[in-house]
Amino acid sequence: MPAPAERPINVYRVHPLTLWIAAFLALALQTFLPVVVPAAHLLDLPLLLVVYFSLMRRSKVFGTLFGAALGLAEDALSHGFLGMYGIANALVGYLGAWASIQFDLEQFLGRLALTSALVLFHSLALDALRRVVVALPPPFQPLDLVSIVLLNSALAMIVFQALDRFRRPA
């Protein structure tokens, strides 16, 4: 029986300045956009960057550390407890990098499905952390959850297309 052919795994990099500018813009928009547009609290731009860069780099360590760093920065700029977004984004970064190794995510539908699943996981992880750590369970609102997943997944496809212009093979 012949050995199964392994598919080549493409790993991409971006210039570090691009990474820093994208992270800064995402954090700035995440902080100031809900002040201007109240419905913008449903969007999570730093989470989308964690998903994109962990898919692109295909490194579990990078995905986890980048997710934790961006999540902690998001925590520092928000009015919540420090560490909630850090933990949730670190888990998303790890799972995104793991999935990018296991599955072919170069296609639009693969990215969309994984992004939707990771946004859903992120929302549920944050809800679970709030219930366990804060012991003040927020009311479960399924319509908000569906809105968050749909809006962030749609925005992710736009953000991913824009960021694809800056990537280069490693």
Image (cartoon, rainbow, N blue to C red):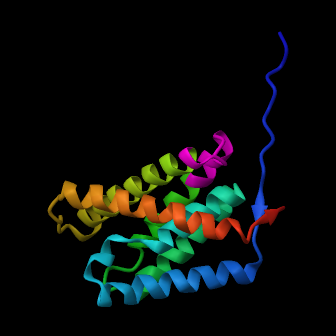
Q: Is residue 152 above or below residue 109?
A: below
Query: Magenta stretch: residue 103 in it?
Result: yes
Residue 59, position as x, y percentages in the image: 70, 57
Disc count in the image? 0
Residue nearest the viewer, comparing 80 with 169: 169
Asked which quadrant contains residue 134, the reply is bottom left
**Left or right: 55 with respect to 70?**
right
Bounds of the magenta segment = 96-109
Asked which quadrant contains residue 31, the reply is bottom left
**Left or right: 87 with respect to 6?**
left
Residue 21, position as x, y percentages in the image: 63, 85
Q: Is residue 125 visible?
A: no
Task: Name which residue lies at 45% across and 85% down.
Answer: 29
Residue 102, position as x, y percentages in the image: 65, 40
Query: Magenta stretch: residue 99 in it?
Result: yes
Residue 24, position as x, y percentages in the image: 56, 86
Task: Name which residue lies at 39% across and 90% down.
Answer: 32
- Check the picture and name the quadrant holding the N terminus: top right
Residue nearest the viewer, comparing 160 with 142: 160
- Check the picture and name the quadrant holding the C terminus: bottom right
Q: Is residue 96 visible?
A: yes
- Judged from this view, the residue extending furthest toward the left is 139
Task: Name which residue lies at 26% across and 82% down.
Answer: 38
Q: Main secondary structure of the magenta part?
A: helix
- Judged from this view, the residue extending furthest toward the top is 1
Task: Name which residue lies at 17% across and 69% down.
Answer: 136
